[in-house]
Amino acid sequence: MVKHLSETSLNIILSLFNKVWESGKLPADWKHGIIVPIAKPGKDHTQPNNYRPIALTSNLCKLMERMVMSRLVHIIEKKNLFSPYQSGFRKGRNTMDSVLCLEAEIRKAQVNKEVLVGVFFDVEKAYDMMWKEGLLIKLERMEIKGRMYNWIKNFLFKRTIQVRVGSALSQIYPVENGTPQGSVSSPVLFNLMIDDIFTQIDMGIGRSLYADDGALWKRGRNMGHVEKCMQNAVKKVENWANEWGFCFSVAKTQVICFTKRKINPIMIIKMYGQKLEQVSVIRFLGMWMDSKLDFRIHIQKIVDKGKKAINVMRCLAGVEWGACRQSLKRIYCALIRAAIDYGSMVYSSASKTQLLKIEAIQSQALRICCGAIRSSPIAAVQVEMDEMPQEIRRLKLKMRYWINIKGHLDSHPVKKVLKDCWEYEYKKLSSFGWTANEEAQNMGISDINIAPSVATSAIPPWLFPMPVVDIQLYEEKHNQERSMLTNIAVQQYIEQTYYSILQIYTDGSKDPESGITAAAVYIPQFKVKISKRISDHISVYTTETIAIFLALQWIEEVQPIRSVICTDSLSVLNSLLSGISTARQDIIFEVMQSLFRIRQSGLMVNFLWVPSHMGVEGNEEADHLAKQALRHAQIDIKVSMSKAEVKGLIANEIRKKWQKEWDSGTKGRHFHHIQEKVAGQERRKFGNRKEDVLMSRMRIGHCSLNQCLYRMGK
């Protein structure tokens, strides 16, 4: 809705937001919520507890919340106010951070013939019962004051709710405790409140925190000592909860003992004077972990879920009727592959027998997608459906996660898992900590300089000036009525609009074969030519951004009063307008900081999109300079690679590995003669399911003829 408003309307909203920010007082309507109860599936709908409350609040308030929270998160991350083991609702972090830390400690305990005792906490009504005054105390301790403090304080207090059932509304009730349900800011504020839950715990005890899902663990051979340490830790957590108004559920807080011993030791750990339940299986952030950590139960859960999805697929398509293969594959990816992928880098240490169960589920689903019969070689079916084997996909996901970890600071908890330790040499396992570094080295990515996974700016982003971007030529080029944009028209527009402004042309280039990249700047008025070879294998987007950054550096040095930077990269200009880039946020921050310094000096810089390869003199010269720089013998500017760029290298290596297996395999040789490449080949689409299935069976070489029927025992 907001995106389609006029500039006048947006300015009115901005004026309202500024008044609210300056006064620290939110409109009463912004602090009122309408609760709509939604019935939980499979529950008794006559019981009120079996309904999920969904809160409807002001959209304008949510918009301002996003703006305020982006500032608050910048302050928190820049000052490192969050504990390193807090992974919940943080950019660049996920549930696997906590799970992998625990899994690595369990494996080390097994190697050392130790026992690891874990306590998994459950907070009762965590968000609903949060102590508001306590949060304000913590904000003051973190030195979050001024308008930010006043806004949060006013946002939390004097809130009201109503319940709506159908068209009927209940009376208005005040909200005394907790963060607003459905609020944009609730996750961040709750993280601030619960973040110090484990600060008083001894350093010899492992810990993890994902929002309100906390866990403590300790390993050792002396059971009495381990039990005593864990009891002391639980007591400190209990004291913390009493101090800050939280309450743990004794019934849901559980203890588990991970050990290879045949007899599982009994642990007596109490909370609030009551003994905590000791279990043999725990569900931790979506991963089912049993006391021996063989992942039998977790894999069986995946198999059961996959079978249900396969039954759905069977209802949607037969041999001669039903959904097309593309639709069926989307269902497979959404319902089956997503469940298989989650935690794959953790359960990859399971036995081959267990992992084969997942391969079987994949093969069943893919056969339904393309209509292949049971005797069809799974290797051929995988190539036909462009779906790699599970073992290779697990490696791909593991390496992508490894890249994400390498881009974090050394305080990241999984960084410790990747460090060398004697257990890794003493006994070879297939766990993440044992194999990730070696597999990265085999893939040739271990020595790559990785850009920060979470980029931060020295200058607060809200102080950045709004870039002036002219995309008039782009709009004219893509206008249906005026699609013929000529070189002369472009040149005339530039001369008429920017006749008295210094024109600076930038461009980037990349050799697709070698991966060599370069950036160039050309300034016709002064005959200035800047061409630099950049680090290999970075994206064209990055080269275009660096070219603009080089132009801004030149402006900072020479200081022309007015200038316009002309580029043919619309994606970079869009990133500058929004200040956000999913590919290279670090370089966008560098560009914006340079632009900030230029504006502070009283200089004016505009940006103009120009079409490429249309004979625009300055753009063609910049393109020529960039291509010339590709031939430089040495790299002039060393640039770290982003996660997305390294993922491209990983994808290439994974494709090569799959191709090698496909070429050297003994199954599916009939199909190998038809399609030698594992990926990248578009297959003709057929108008109906019957023709599609027939063609797939003929390509694979297994049809319902005597030879194949004999193999299946028919």
Image (cartoon, rainbow, N blue to C red):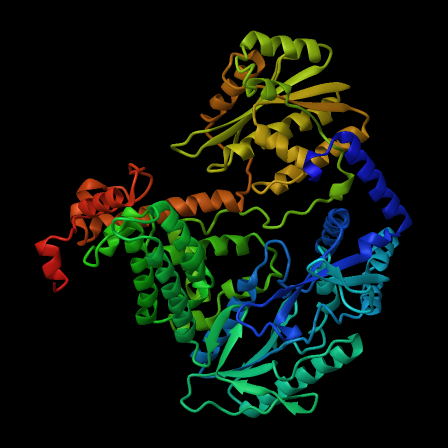
Q: Which residue is at a point 76% across and 30% down the rendered structure image?
A: 7
Q: Residue furthest front?
A: 167
Q: Is residue 144 visible?
A: no
* 485 left or right of 128 in image: left
Q: Residue furthest right?
A: 23
Above or below, 275 relative to 355: below
Q: Is residue 551 visible?
A: yes
* 215 left or right of 138 in image: left
Picture coordinates of residue 230, whole percent (x, y): 62, 84
Q: Which residue is at a point 41% across and 59% down the rendered structure image?
A: 336
93 or 638, nearer to the observer: 93
Q: Which residue is at a point 30% across and 59% down the rendered structure image?
A: 364
| Quadrant containing the N terminus in the rendered view | top right
65 or 509, nearer to the observer: 65
Above or below, 486 relative to 625: above
Could you say which quadrant of the image residue 695 lies in?
top left
Picture coordinates of residue 664, whole percent (x, y): 21, 51
| Quadrant containing the C terminus in the rendered view | bottom left
